[in-house]
Amino acid sequence: MTTKETVLAVLERLPDDCTLDDVQYHLYVTQAIASGTADVDAGRVVPQEHVEAELRRKWLIESDR
């Protein structure tokens, strides 16, 4: 889907009385989802277990201070 097609699809889903802020927000969310999907497809992800271990290490070490 081209960018123009994506924008048109977003506009079609919004109500007629939406604001420009509504349009901007929905376009932002659509772009963020596409960016995240591209990261997953390219393997640019961190396993959940790694994130959990890092957070535990950081918070447990800092809470001992």
Image (cartoon, rainbow, N blue to C red):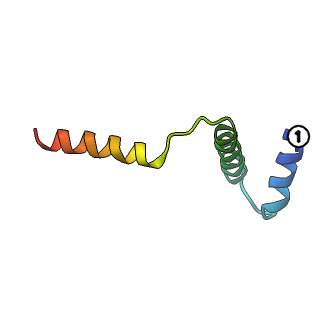
Q: Residues within 10 Å of mark 1 (few under 14, many from 20)?
A: few
Q: Who's the residue at 18% across and 39% down the image?
A: 62
Q: Is residue 8 left or right of residue 57?
A: right
| Towards the viewer: 29 or 38 | 38
Name the spot of residue 24 as percent of width and height, x first: 69, 46
Q: Residue furthest left?
A: 65
Q: Who's the residue at 71% across and 44% down the image?
A: 34
Q: Is residue 9 left or right of residue 36?
A: right
Q: Which residue is mark 1?
A: 2
Q: Who's the residue at 15% across and 44% down the image?
A: 63
| Towards the viewer: 29 or 62 | 62
Name the spot of residue 28 as percent of width and height, x first: 67, 44
Name the spot of residue 50 as percent of width and height, x first: 41, 42
Q: Who's the residue at 46% across and 48% down the image?
A: 48
The picture quadrant where one finds residue 43 is: top right
Name the spot of residue 12 as percent of width and height, x first: 85, 59
The vertical placement of 16 against 39, above or below, is below
The picture quadrant where one finds residue 1 is: top right
The picture quadrant where one finds residue 53 is: top left
Q: Is residue 18 left or right of residue 25?
A: right
Which amino acid type is marked by label 1?
Thr
Q: Secondary structure at mark 1?
A: loop
In the rendered image, the quadrant that contains the C terminus is: top left
